[in-house]
Amino acid sequence: MNEPVRVQKDFTNAPLCLSGKGVTKVFGFGDKKTVAVDHVDFEFHEGEFVSIVGESGSGKTTLSKMLLGLSNATEGEIFFQGKPRDISSGHKKKEYWKGIQAIFQDPFSSFNTFQKIDTVLLDCINMRGGKGLSKQEKFNMMSDACHFVNLEFKELTNKYPFELSGGQMQRLMIARIFLLKPKILLADEPTSMVDACSRATILDMLLNLRDEIGMTVIFITHDIGLAYYISDSVYIMEHGKFVEYGKADEVILHPQAAYTKRLISDVPKIHEEWDLSTVDLHA
Amino acid sequence: MKNTIRQVFHSPKFVGGFVIFVAILLTMFIYPLFNPGNPLQQIGVGTFAKPGTYVSLYDATKTTPETFRLPEADENRLAASLSDEDRVAMVEYFTAMGIDISDLDTGDTDTLLQMWEDNYDPSVRPKGMTGARVNYFKRLNNSLQDLKGGDTIIIAEEGEDGALVESKSISTTDYVRTGAVANVKTLPLGTDNFGRDVLKELVSATGTSIGIGLLAGIVATLIGLTFGLLAGYLGGFVDDFIMFITNIFTVIPGFVLLILISYSIGQEQRGAAVVATVIGLTGWTWTARSVRSQVISLRNRDHVNLSKLSGHSLLRIILTDILPYIASYVVMAFILQVSSGILAEAQLSLLGLGPRTTEVPTLGLMMNWAMLYSAHTNGSWWAYFPVILVITLISFSLNLMNTGLDQVFNPTLRD
Ligand SMILES: Nc1ncnc2c1ncn2[C@@H]1O[C@H](COP(=O)(O)OP(=O)(O)O)[C@@H](O)[C@H]1O
Ligand SMILES: [Mg+2]
């Protein structure tokens, strides 16, 4: 039995990759006003594995849509590689998306059900400027990508994504990231809708991919135990606000905010070695 | 995709509607092969000839006859020549003579004639009857005797000296085979007010009306789809602007708009294609509205987000990530548009605002003509009833197809 080895690094001195000041999202107005994300500040470093942890409805997905540039912030500013992010035109958005990619929560609704898997992967190669490559080169690239996530490309050609299982689809998503090699990967609860078996595999693949490409991973989860297992640093989100953040060890082993303590006490038992029942919740 | 089509063709409702519609289409294409020629040609001089087979009297007399002695021949001849008016008159005579007619059936020619034979007495003048009426009964009696008498008809031609010479005599036992007569014309639905073959006209009109429905449906669906896609996907200012226009069109009742536009175009410019386009131009609003709401529910789906992240253009996202998801819906909307386009043409034409009348018949125009010439009050059912039946059948088959599609695409509706 291989014990997972948890390696945490300190990224405080690494260059900034994505950061934000006072980022806010308000839905509706008047009586129906919801402040989904409320003036959050954050700093994600290059190569860092960051987790954003919060209960369902705390605003994680809303924040991720803003980070991805899929929706506009009501207030505040987001910085990409230290400079204010400019996605004001379609062309600039395309450029930005070369640097940031995503894996969504529900694999079954993440793919266009009318497009074959080949198309999905070919699009990635084209986006990386591989349009002119020969058929064989493209085939090899797609095979490599599938190989990385333990899929066999030959068995996937001419198939539709919905013919795969949820776990296989999320792996296909990772193969997509493997081809795109973005600076930042935003994974919004990528394992919450797949079976327990696939869960560990997918997490390992994400960690491997981070090491392989050297990208920043922003991992969104409601499971603080999972966050502790894989992250370098964590941000704890409650009702649209970051109530606590810092290095994973510091935050999870010495929680300050009541909310964090509650999240930790709700975790049954993460791993014998990192049994959190020993954490002093009353410190 | 293949699977969906298979499912569609397993829906009894869809198949039912489809079969009826295809049967109508096939008739439209095949019938003219057997009965070619201009459907608007006036073949009859009179109006509203009844449905049936017409034998040329001239050619029949020139055809060599066979002799048959058929037992019911006399009776049939009498029955056919005894008009309803004559029958009523006979009853009147019996009543005046004080005869008990309580169980007399005027449709029973045999008994009626027998009673006439027994009771008619030219020498008696019933009380209170005018002289003119008495003479009428005399004439009636004479013509009945003639019919029974088995006279021959003599055909005479002008001889060399100018006098009439008997060329042929036709007796009541002479028969000619219809196949041997040079000219026989079957008019299954008779003729209309202009003396045109109604069936031929109907087949041609069905084709034109379906064409109008299709063109109107295509115009309405294209406009509605484009507006709905743009408004729904882009949102913001574009949405506001498109919805503003859509609302204007919705507030004015479509049919009123249709009447106004058709009227202002003028009779001369109103060809079938123009009318179809106008119908399409006034009927797109609900397609736009429903496409818009579908797109709004689609545009924030993750597969659309993924497509954006893949750097796809607006056009590609709309065509590949939105359109296929609403395609089934658009097909259904299109079918309904075709159906309502056909009905709109019929309504317009009934008001006299349909396509100009000289070129092609349409179902609406046929109804319009039938109405103008009072077919419905003078009992010429064949001039309008088949038209109504065809319109109903087309609508019915299209709506049935639509219901079938709806059940396949929205399985929750299935019982
Ligand atoms: N499009 C939207 N319109 C209105 N409210 C929204 C919308 N999206 C999310 N919300 C609200 O914002 C809050 C945060 O939602 P979300 O970001 O999905 O939470 P999480 O991903 O953490 O579960 C919720 O209260 C949700 O109801
Ligand atoms: Mg979420």
Image (tube, coloured by chain):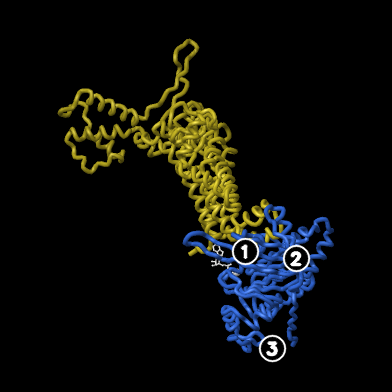
Question: Which labelled disc corresponds to residue A23?
Answer: 1
Q: Do residues under tags 2 and 3 come within 8 Å of each other at their CB atoms?
A: no
Residue under circle 2?
A183
- Residue at horizontal 47%, vertical 29%? B195
Crowding around mark 3 (Cα neighbors within 10 Å: few <14, some 14 to 19, many 20+) is few
In this rendering, position of residue A236 left or right of residue A100: left
Mark 3 lies on residue: A273
| Quadrant hosting ligand 2 | bottom right
Residue B152 visible within the image: yes
Disc with the residue nearer the chain's start (1 vs 2) = 1
CA distance separating discs 1 and 3 = 37 Å
Which badge, 2 or 3, comes first in the chain's sequence? 2
- Other residues around mark 2 within 10 Å, as few (<14) / some (14–19) / many (≥20): many
Amino acid type of the residue tagged 3 in the rendering: Glu
Examine the image and state in which quarter residue A271 appears. bottom right
x and y percent of residue A164 in the render? 68, 70
Q: Picture quarter containing residue B139? A: top left
Which dot, 1 or 3, sits closer to the camera?
1
Asked if badges 2 and 3 are on one and the same chain, I answer yes
Q: Nearer the viewer, residue A74 or B305?
A: A74
Output the chain of dot 3: A
Question: Toward the viewer: B319 or A83?
Answer: A83
Distance from the alpha carbon under mark 1 to that under mark 2 = 21 Å
Residue situated in front as seen by the camera: B183 or A276: A276
Image position of A252 with respect to B229: above or below? below
The tag on residue B96 is none
Q: Color of chain A here? A: blue
- Asked if one can make out residue A221 in the rendered structure from this viewpoint, the answer is no
Q: Is residue A159 above or below residue B287?
A: below
Q: Dot 2: what SS?
A: loop
Q: Chain of mark 1?
A: A
